Image (tube, rainbow, N blue to C red):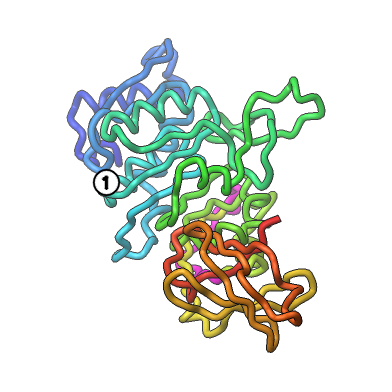
Amino acid sequence: MAYWHDGCGMRDFVAIMRVRLSQSKVGRWVTPEPIVVDVDLASLGPSVRLRSHTTDISVLGEVLGGDSLGHLPADLDAATVLDLGANIGLAYRWMRSRHPTARFVCVEPDPGNLEILRANVRAVDSVSEIVGACVGGRARRVKLTSTDGEWGFRMSDVVDVDDADTDVLTMDQILERTGIERIDILKCDIEGAEAELFVDCASWIDLVDCMVVECHLDVMSTESLMDALSANGARFELLHVERNPRFGYEMATLRRIPARESGDLRPLDLGGSRVSYAAAGGDSARLVAGASVAACERVRPWQWRIRSAARSASAIVGAFVFPRGTTGIADASITRRP
């Protein structure tokens, strides 16, 4: 069994088996009451917390026995990892074992999962950040529902706000709250909310270098994810896709293609004008619309504004946002701030 081969001792193996068998026909004898165990695993580290009578054991089986996270580039040296839909933190543990110096931000909405997530993070890490919220395309309050146990919570919009129990944050809000300026790995398993997240991702997608996205087929396939990325001006290479139609999901691993590899300047349609950009170093850049050029100055690390423009370039005067963490403009796309 994967639990034994992962190198845990007999005590840990017995504890895991009690959790596992709680879901079986013999559970009423082996584990008659819910328990919480802490076990040591070679690949995930010490004091991994699990609950019986939940889907925690299924998540552990996926992480130890599956390979959903194993198709990221082998030479990837991640400095920042954003885990959307962190559940109880087992994927976080797996990624942290491979990127021990990276900064992690974990986002999870369910209070029960959050309690175990905090234990699994704090057992090995006192600085990683945990955000208790859903992630979506627009900020609002929703109700969490699940028909598939603790690993399957979904957002449900409500008519009466009093029926809502959970905040939805946008990616821009999460980035602002945490101060993230670059995302080396984005892991996204948000139970169908990926459709609204990626349909309008132009303001942040160029911050991401690599992604592992679980696509739930009732709302988004891998192909529709790629279409959404392209529609938002992002170019990603599909490194691997694990298709599980029986269970209604696909796991896609992607790597961003830098602008210098894509061979163009990614023109963006702003108010009817085809606007591209020209790269420049330091704190200056240029927006280009046809033959008209507008000079820009840096306002914040990722935000630029028009400093001067010819009369013929007046249509593009306004505030523009480059991705956070952009030091040169060659790899950036431009998004107009509403």
Provide the secondary structure element on which disc 1 rests: helix
- Which quadrant: the C terminus? bottom right
Q: Residue at x 23, y 32 (%)?
A: 46
Label total for image? 1
Is residue 266 something that shows in the picture? no
- Residue 299 lies within the magenta run: no
Q: Which residues are magenta?
A: 235-249
Q: Position of residue 32 (x, y in %)?
A: 42, 11
Going by the numbered disc 1, the residue's amino acid type is Ser
Q: Position of residue 200 (x, y in %)?
A: 67, 57
Out of 283 and 136, give the one closest to the viewer: 283
Q: Residue at x 34, y 30 (%)?
A: 120
Out of 184 and 26, give the one closest to the viewer: 184
Q: Main secondary structure of the magenta part?
A: strand
- Residue 237 lies within the magenta run: yes
Q: Position of residue 19 (x, y in %)?
A: 37, 24
| Above-or-below relation of 275 to 54 | below
Q: Residue at x 30, y 41 (%)?
A: 2
| Above-or-below relation of 270 to 123 | below
Q: Looking at the rendering, which quadrant does residue 64 occupy?
A: top left
Q: Looking at the rendering, which quadrant does residue 45 occupy?
A: top left
Q: Is residue 105 left or right of residue 313?
A: left
| Above-or-below relation of 143 to 314 | above
Q: Residue at x 58, y 51 (%)?
A: 249
The residue wearing badge 1 is 97
